[in-house]
Image (cartoon, rainbow, N blue to C red):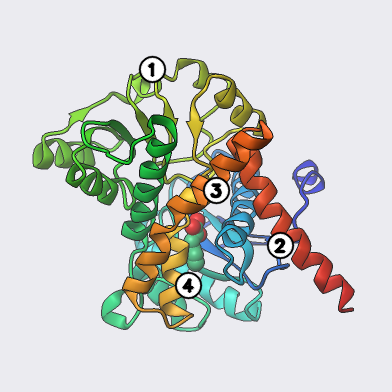
Amino acid sequence: METLIKSWDGEAIVSRFDQETSTWMFIAIHSTALGVPTGGTRLKTYPTPHDALFDAMRLAEGMTYKWAGVEFPRGGGKAVLDIPESFDPSQREGLITRYGRWLADLNGIFETGPDLGTTPSDMALIRRGFNGVFGCPTDLGGAGDPGPYTALGVFSGIRASCEQRFNSLDLNGRSVLVQGVGSVGRPLINLLLEAGCDVKFSDLDSARIDEVRGELGLSFVEPEAVYGEPCDVFAPCATGGILNAKTNPQLKCLIVAGGANNQLEQTQDGEALHQRDILYAPDYIINAGGAIYLLAVENMGWSVSKAEDRIVEIGDTLKDIYAHAEKSGINTMKAAEELAKGRVKQAAQKKLAEI
Ligand code: PPY
């Protein structure tokens, strides 16, 4: 963990071990330059606490650029609750409640919301003692699940990417492979079907697979066959790190545009896609819809329809990034980084000048 922290350019790591459940809790604060660090709380079992911390750090950095990319006044942070394999669901309420109390004790240095493995009801538990929480259930006055709004942004991004790659906005007949049919992938499928796409999907969870196969009659791609499956658009909507030295050479798609965070395992994987002439929609740009929705509706007083209009503009941001990448002869991830990092740097310098 020493090496991990040394190699990171973030601002703080806060950690605590929950004795009752043997859960490592990490809050990674990457940047406060643009505002209060804000990002979801992820709950899952990692191979080691080192992996959990690493995930939190990378996700927090992604949040910095996500907020910078949409020009919302928030900083980058993310929390991870690394539950042990032996975790019993009956322990959940206690763990989330203690986590919420911890956040309150930290006096709002980090604000949070739902992420992979956490739900609006978990957020309601946190809100009992801490106000800095987004995405509580709608019947309790919260904004609820941001997943459908992330999906809306991804859909707009897929449209923009197809326009870039095929010179046509028409999605009718385009083949799209959705990896992961959870809170983002599932609503994304509906939008793609409405637009006339030929949708295939993959997932690891048999209940979800049966549901999507049964209800929608879509073809299922075995998880190990996903990367080599020919399609126009590959939309990763599950876990991160799936674009790497092993999977990139297998890809038979023309576009990668999906909702997952940290899709590239390493920076050079963005260049590898570029070299293969696969158009990559930078993850923290295309998947910002959920973050926009939560902040806009719960913090900035926007109507849902105003937030939706803003989310659809993700497509325009992507087009700007693609144009910049083309003009400068760089890959799209690099182009997004230049945009987002430039904004963060400017804000950090302004803060320094004010001291
Ligand atoms: C993400 O987009 O990855 C988020 O974590 C979004 C978010 C935004 C605000 C509160 C919680 C989660």
> Gap in Å between the C-alphas at discs 3 and 2?
25 Å
Mark seen at residue 150 = none
- Tag 2: amino acid: Ser
Question: Could you give the CA–CA distance between mark 1 and mark 4, rounded to whole angstroms?
Answer: 37 Å
Cα distance, mark 1 to mark 3? 30 Å
Q: Residue at left 43%, top 58%?
A: 313
| Above or below for 231 versus 29 | above
Amino acid tagged 1: Gly
Residue at image mark 2: 31
Name the residue carrying label 4: 295
Residues 101 and 64: in front is 64
Q: Of marks 1 and 4, which one's residue comes earlier in the chain? A: 1
Between disc 4 and disc 3, the foreground one is 3
Amino acid type at mark 3? Asp
Horizontal side of residue 187 vs 101, given as left or right: left
SS of the residue under disc 1: loop
Where in the figure is residue 210, as x and y percent of width and height?
Answer: 16, 37
The reply, left or right, for residue 74 in relation to residue 144 is right
